[in-house]
Amino acid sequence: MKMDPVLLEILANKFVAATEEMASALQRTARTLFVKEAADYACALLDLDGRVIAHPRAMGVTILINLDASAAIAAVPDLEPGDVIVTNDPYSTEGMVSHTPDITLIEPYFHRGEIVAYGWCFIHSTDVGGAVPSSIAPSLDEIYQEGLRIPPMKLMNKGEWNQDFVTILKANCRIPEENMGDIRAMLAGLHRGRQRTRDMIERHGLETFLLCQDELPAYSEAKARAVLRRLADGVYEFWDYLDDDLVSPIPVRLRIKMTVDGGSVHVDLTGTDPEVAAAYNTATFGRFHEWFTMRFTSFMCTHDKTIVLNAGMYRPITVTNPVGTVLNAEFPAAVGLRSNPARRFNDAMTGVLLKAAPGQMAAPTPGTGLIFVLSEYEETGTRKMVNVLEPLGGGMGAYKGHDGVDARDSTMSNMANHSIESIEAQCGIVVREYDIRADSGGPGRWRGGVGQTFAVEILRDGGIVVPRGMERMRFPAWGVMGGGPALPFQMFLNRERPDGRLVRKIDQFAVNRGDVVTVLMPGASGYGDPFERDPDIVRRDVRQGFVSRQAATRDYGVVLSGTGKVDETATAKLRAARMGRNLGMDFDFGPEREAWETVFDDATMCALNRRLMALPRSTRYAKRRWIFEQTVPELSPPGGKSLSELLADPVAARARLSAAMEAAFGDAPLPGQATR
């Protein structure tokens, strides 16, 4: 039976409204700053198969539309009215949960004794125990170190609390009362979803309600296929890098081959680097995981603003996702920083979409988001607190005809900043600077969005800073169609003092009264030749602080007079020297990546990874590390010697690489250099 299209549209809006009411109830009653202020949470309605049928359009985290809750639901059979499932385990939920801080609840919604749908929600808990405050650190190499693991179990049993669970949770985290407050907020959200589900069934009948669970995803699938037909049929390849995995200075490469055929898309991740002995892994169980969808979601919603957000959007997309890579890690790999490889995957996805649909996709985002965590004792010195001071972001990538959004990146979620008043009242800090970071956006005819600058002074001794998400320190977001790369990420401790230092990628570091921590977030990428940018717009950017005078001349060819006006004669002369370039489909990766790929080109890396993936899982990482150490013995993390210096003689480096691979595998020499 087909539903009347007018009624379907009405019910689509009712389903979405129900999830938005769930989200509002959760956020308004939450306890921790990271949920009630930053909005790191999500809500949805699920069908009987555990797939999303409705999701808020602009509340909370917006990338989880393709999640699959079937494994978590199947793990707790014989559900009854009043039951609620709780879990935070990526492995027993087969990737529905992505790391342990994401405490997730699922409630079956009943009608006349039968389950008719499920309510789902999660919050990012600021701490669930483990090796460090906030439970996430790059150097952790097993999920056992990342806090309390909760396999799917009953939180509520016929409306009554599972007190054994509550006791265990409180005993294994640093902020037990705050966590329980957030869990109660999730229950409030689920309660609202149950009410609205009941209301829809009473108004439209059970048959219509259940029919919507088939019709809404099919409706979204049809609209998604129409958008995906904008992609030219063909095969497109792209790759991008994490700076390193902290426990070694070796870059981590993620590779995509996308095949487009008449609105159907296949994404092949073969060639991506093996799982690392650190927390930069993602447990996806071979699916086209929800963490892989953000750039497709952006593309679809840009070109069809009416599309209904549910799992049907992703039916036209299939995936080959080999087991054992950083994008499909095996138990018990650590996955706390799963957002870093996921962000880089989506940057690479931006590359293939730009190739398949030139002019219809924005340039890359900054590719990182820093979560600034401070653990400290309260003023009385008796109770340890863990707080997220700020979720820091960069801008958004420029696109044809438009600059990127400044100091905000909504491609992954609609998280907000914490107000300065809130964090100064709740934490022992004073915010000394919170501003845009000039020149951080990639130059272009359309400028990339700039990042943020954030500096805090510590007011109490004995604190620990846990900076999660330090990335793009070596390989900045790359420019498009003649646009330039963004500035890289930087972090400093006591930057203005003689003993100040650059903070490299790290698990945590100690701070005391009077210390000042400064974060300089990267910007997003520029689009188009910056020498074609309107000089008056460059003048305005300088006046507003987005671009410095020096960058206006260096990057845009715009000379300003002492009064701040455009010197038209000097500008014309400077720009004339750059006229007539043939830009084509141009990606400007910056000198570090260009130097790296003179040695580690695509054909070589694909060959290396094929051989590594043929080895037992227990030996892959050590073998890979040994090969790179033989090839670039002085390789250091970002902030040390540049790759341009270390690989100044690429012929010698390739000879060392060939010898190392022959010693490791005893087979053929390296393939020839590849061209992109």
Image (cartoon, rainbow, N blue to C red):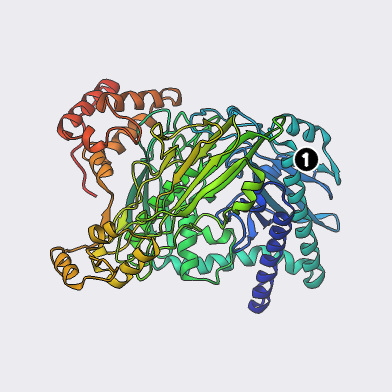
Location of mark 1 (residue): 154
Depth order, front residue of 570/313:
570
The residue under the point 63% across, 31% down is 147
- Left or right, residue 482 beside residue 223: left
In this rendering, is residue 113 above or below 633?
Answer: below
Residue 575 appears in which quarter of the rendering?
Answer: bottom left
The residue under the point 47% across, 55% down is 435
Query: How would you rate the neighbour count of disc 1 (Cα within 10 Å): few for under 14, some for 14-19, many for 20 or more?
Result: many
The residue under the point 84% across, 49% down is 82
Find residue 172 and report its horizontal and vertical position in percent.
Answer: 70, 30
In what element is the residue under mark 1?
strand
Residue 468 seen in render: yes
Find residue 523 and report its horizontal and vertical position in percent.
Answer: 39, 53
Residue 51 appears in which quarter of the rendering?
Answer: bottom right
In this rendering, is residue 615 above or below 33?
Answer: above
Please state which amino acid type lies under the numbered disc 1: Lys
